[in-house]
Image (cartoon, rainbow, N blue to C red):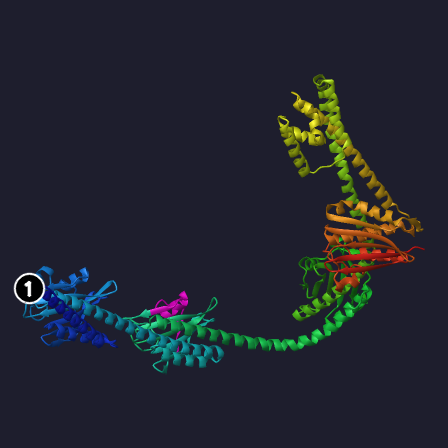
């Protein structure tokens, strides 16, 4: 029995295996048939025919969903071997249900009743006995429905048929999607090729137009290219007429023939060209057949495109293209037309610029020849006038050339005096006769006042006469006024004014040079004196600052003594009542540490000692150990803290220590006052030594060490901040010299060294004897002197300091003083290392 069942199962399995192999063979045959098929109709025909053959269906149709029209497009329909042409049907009934549910429908009986239930009337052919509706699914979307029907048999299709049909339908969906993508790719390639061709043509047109300046040639070429690129029956260009403020047609073609010229007013309400020009916007108008027209030419154009021709803010005109086809100008055509308008605008602007350039060049050529001769003459005159440094020679040269070049009856040169409120006549000529000024100061006449105020030439024409007034300008400064006069009306034109302006400029330069030379001679002596005063001012400032510090210390210490003394006098009676005689001796011993100690502690050292003493006091069981430890450090009794445990454990220990601190403050403040007084005395002595002036000019013996230390003392305020001063003084005999002048040498060299180091570094002062010379060397660790300027540092007025920080006379004065002592000065410098100035002075 079991053997029979086993054989039955094997038979069923064999049947299923055979059915699956048959299904796979069908699927493979469909896929093989679709290989390399990329046309939708071919794909539908192949699949439809195979379905009919495989399932022996009497009706097969493939309905594809067209989402844009919301209908089914049926490219394949066959009924009883008769093929019908492609057609469309609505979305309803069985197909609508499959579309919405994405599930297949299978009906093997009662199909008429099911048709009523699903709202699916029979639109064509016979009523079926069996039917299957299979969705075509691509991705997440239903793209169509495949229908099988048998008109004669019920139960013609099984569930296995539906399963196999689903697989075939999926293959169909994939093939159709591939065909759709292939079709879109082909269209895109065709569009890309068309766009590339358009760009190539447009690029060639742009190069031709922008290189051509013959506008009629440009218009003809543009008409031909527009016809090639766009659908065109009518083409014209209108340009703006600046005189009539109308649009004039300058070129027009219609169907290959010239268009009759016409003009349009800008405010014409009907003309699209006028509207385009007014709004400066592109206008696209698509008309219907029979619609009223207001267009150029005779063609019944239905598509019209207008674009303004604009350069910057300026309207040049309008270009239009028109065709009889409807809706002919889409985005592509508008883009091409817009580009062509841009090229035409550039060509029009280039042509206008060229014409203006030709006119300007002709005018310039006419004036340039005349100007060259005048300029050459004025150049020679300018060299002559500005080559004089004496005022009399300048005025004589001006007089000669003004009368030679200009119509001059009278001629005046004035200089401003009294802060610009008066004029003095320095040269006057009337009818070739010199006018004597008698040194009088004159009021400024109105024309001259206007010339000075506006700092430009003034033409004055009164009662048939002509005059020019021009300022004599040196930079922004008005030196005076020059004027020429003639009895002829309107005698001076633009050329005369330009010549007079040039002569005045030359005269002003020469007069300014003359003034500068005189001022320079006067200023040189003043600057030397100012340099000496500046050095003295620096020294005084340093001394004032140096004295101010100890005076401030004295003031603060005096204030501390007063406060501490008041507290001490108040506390002492009570203190001695509280302390027994041994405790009183301990108190006095504790105060002695303050008087005997000269130790100076910084904050970090005091904090470390306080922590150390605090530990000792805490081990001894002293309360408030930190405060008491700090007071012991302040009294400088911290090293002997254990000696004073009795006082620290006293029940009035805080009062005892506060009184001791007040008395110690008196002692330390008095010591500070003594130190400050000694410091002030040293500074005063150095200042007295430095400022000793010997006007007799006689040489005196001087200790060089004392002389240098005096200057270092005065500069101590600047050196103590970040400069280490090293003294290398060898024994040397006194030097006969002028002490106050040598002090100025040391002052300049030391001050320069401090500045070169920017107040950070090492300043080394050396004194030694080399043969019969005393050599003083001042070395700094500053930035050094570049080799390219080293030979110029002793030149008068040469300085590397910013404007306002040095006159450039310091080292010049040093060299002159050393020369006066029959000595010499040398310099050795290396960039980034430092500089050494060595002063060699003879000992005999």
Rendered residue at 63%/29% (across/down): 619
Residue 1 location, x and y as percent? 6, 62
Rendered residue at 48%/67% (across/down): 312
Name the residue that disc number 1 marks.
Answer: 109
Q: Quadrant of residue 467?
A: bottom right
Q: Nearer the viewer, residue 472 or 676?
A: 676
Q: Quadrant of residue 295?
A: bottom left
Outermost residue toward the top in this view: 577
173 relative to 764, above or below:
below
Work out whether residue 37 can be spotted: yes
Rendered residue at 76%/51% (across/down): 762
Query: Is 279 within the magenta?
Result: yes
Residue 141 location, x and y as percent? 24, 63
Residue 692 location, x and y as percent? 88, 45
805 relative to 640, above or below:
below
Q: Nearer the viewer, residue 433 or 168?
A: 168
Asked whether, in this view, residue 51 is left or right of residue 201, the answer is left
Asked whether, in this view, residue 431 is left or right of residue 318, the answer is right
How dense is the environment of label 1, judged by Cα within 10 Å: few (below 14), some, or many (20 and up)? some
Query: Is 364 within the magenta?
Result: no
> Which corner quadrant holds the C terminus?
bottom right
Count of numbered tags: 1
Q: Secondary structure at mark 1?
A: loop
Outermost residue toward the bottom in this view: 257
Work out whether residue 426 can be spotted: no
Residue 515 location, x and y as percent? 79, 60
Q: Nearer the viewer, residue 647 or 566?
A: 647
Stretch in magenta: 260-284
């Amino acid at each position: 029995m079991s053997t029979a069942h086993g054989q039955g199962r094997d038979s069923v399995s064999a049947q299923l295996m055979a059915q699956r192999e048959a299904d796979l063979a069908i699927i493979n045959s469909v896929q093989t048939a679709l290989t390399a098929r990329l046309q939708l109709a071919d794909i539908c025909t192949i699949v439809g025919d195979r379905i009919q053959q495989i399932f022996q269906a009497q009706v097969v149709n493939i309905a594809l969903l067209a989402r844009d029209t919301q209908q089914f497009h049926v490219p394949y329909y066959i009924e009883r071997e008769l093929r019908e042409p492609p057609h469309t049907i609505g979305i309803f009934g069985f197909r609508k249900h499959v579309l919405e549910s994405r599930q297949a429908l299978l009906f093997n009986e009662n199909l008429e009743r099911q048709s009523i239930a699903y709202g699916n009337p029979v639109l064509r052919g016979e009523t079926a006995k069996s039917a299957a509706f299979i969705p075509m699914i691509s991705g997440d979307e239903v793209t169509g429905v495949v229908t099988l029907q048998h008109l004669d048999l019920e139960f013609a299709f099984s569930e296995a048929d539906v399963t196999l049909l689903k697989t075939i339908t999926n293959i169909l969906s994939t093939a159709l999607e591939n065909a759709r993508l292939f079709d879109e790719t082909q269209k895109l390639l065709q569009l890309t090729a068309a766009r590339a061709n358009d760009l190539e043509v447009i690029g060639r047109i742009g190069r031709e137009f922008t290189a051509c300046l013959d506008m009629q040639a440009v218009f003809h070429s543009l008409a031909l290219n527009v016809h090639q690129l766009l659908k065109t029956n009518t083409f014209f260009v209108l340009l703006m007429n600046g005189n009539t403020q109308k649009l004039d047609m300058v070129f027009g073609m219609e169907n290959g023939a010239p268009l009759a010229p016409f003009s349009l007013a800008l405010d014409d309400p009907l003309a699209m060209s006028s509207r385009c020009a007014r709004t400066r916007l592109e206008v696209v108008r698509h008309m219907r057949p029979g619609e009223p027209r207001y267009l150029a030419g005779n063609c019944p154009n239905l598509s019209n495109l207008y674009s303004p021709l604009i350069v910057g803010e300026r309207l040049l005109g309008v270009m239009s293209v028109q065709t009889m086809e409807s809706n002919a100008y889409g985005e592509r055509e508008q883009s091409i037309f817009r580009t062509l308008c841009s090229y035409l605008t550039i060509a029009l602007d280039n042509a206008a610029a060229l014409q203006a350039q030709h006119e300007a060049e002709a005018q310039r050529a006419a004036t340039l020849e005349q100007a060259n001769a005048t300029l050459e003459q004025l150049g020679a005159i300018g060299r002559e006038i500005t080559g004089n440094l004496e005022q009399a020679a300048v005025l004589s040269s001006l007089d000669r050339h003004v009368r030679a070049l200009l119509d001059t009856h009278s001629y005046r040169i004035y200089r401003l005096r009294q802060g610009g409120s008066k004029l003095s006549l320095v040269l006057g000529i009337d009818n070739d006769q010199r006018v004597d000024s008698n040194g009088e100061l004159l009021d400024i006449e109105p024309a001259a006042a206007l010339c000075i105020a506006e700092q430009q030439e003034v033409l004055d024409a009164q009662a048939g006469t002509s005059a020019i007034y021009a300022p004599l300008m040196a930079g922004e400064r008005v030196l005076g006024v020059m004027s020429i006069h003639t009895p002829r009306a309107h005698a001076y034109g633009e050329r005369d004014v330009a010549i007079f302006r040039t002569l005045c400029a030359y005269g002003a330069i020469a007069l300014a040079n003359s003034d500068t030379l005189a001022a320079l001679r006067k200023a040189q002596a003043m600057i030397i004196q100012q340099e000496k005063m500046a050095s003295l001012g620096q020294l005084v400032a340093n001394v004032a600052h140096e004295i101010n510090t100890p005076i401030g210390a004295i003031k603060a210490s005096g204030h501390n003594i007063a406060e501490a003394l008041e507290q001490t006098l108040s506390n002492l009676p009570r203190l001695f009542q509280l302390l027994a005689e041994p405790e009183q001796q301990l108190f006095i011993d504790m105060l002695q540490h303050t008087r005997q100690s000269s130790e100076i502690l910084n904050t970090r050292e005091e904090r470390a000692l306080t922590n150390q003493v605090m530990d000792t006091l805490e081990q001894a069981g002293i309360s408030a150990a930190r405060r008491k430890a700090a007071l012991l450090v302040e009294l400088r009794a911290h090293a002997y803290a254990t000696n004073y445990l009795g006082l620290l454990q006293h029940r009035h220990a805080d009062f005892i220590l506060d009184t001791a601190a007040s008395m110690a403050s008196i002692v330390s403040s008095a010591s500070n006052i003594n130190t400050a007084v000694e410091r002030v005395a040293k500074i005063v002595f150095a200042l007295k030594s430095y400022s000793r002036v010997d006007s007799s000019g006689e040489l005196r013996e001087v200790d060089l060490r004392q002389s240098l230390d005096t200057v270092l003392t005065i500069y101590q305020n600047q050196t103590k901040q970040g400069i280490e001063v090293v003294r290398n003084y060898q024994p040397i005999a006194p030097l006969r010299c002028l002490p106050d002048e040598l002090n100025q040498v040391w002052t300049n060299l030391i001050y320069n060294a401090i500045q070169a180091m920017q107040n950070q570094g090492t300043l080394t002062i050396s004194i030694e004897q080399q043969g019969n010379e005393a050599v003083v060397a001042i070395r700094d660790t500053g930035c050094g002197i570049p080799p390219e300027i080293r030979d110029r540092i002793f030149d008068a007025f040469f300085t590397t300091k910013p404007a306002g920080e040095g006159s450039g006379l310091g080292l010049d004065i040093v060299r002159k003083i050393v020369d006066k002592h029959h000595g010499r000065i040398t310099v050795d410098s290396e960039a980034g290392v430092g500089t050494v100035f060595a002063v060699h002075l003879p000992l005999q």
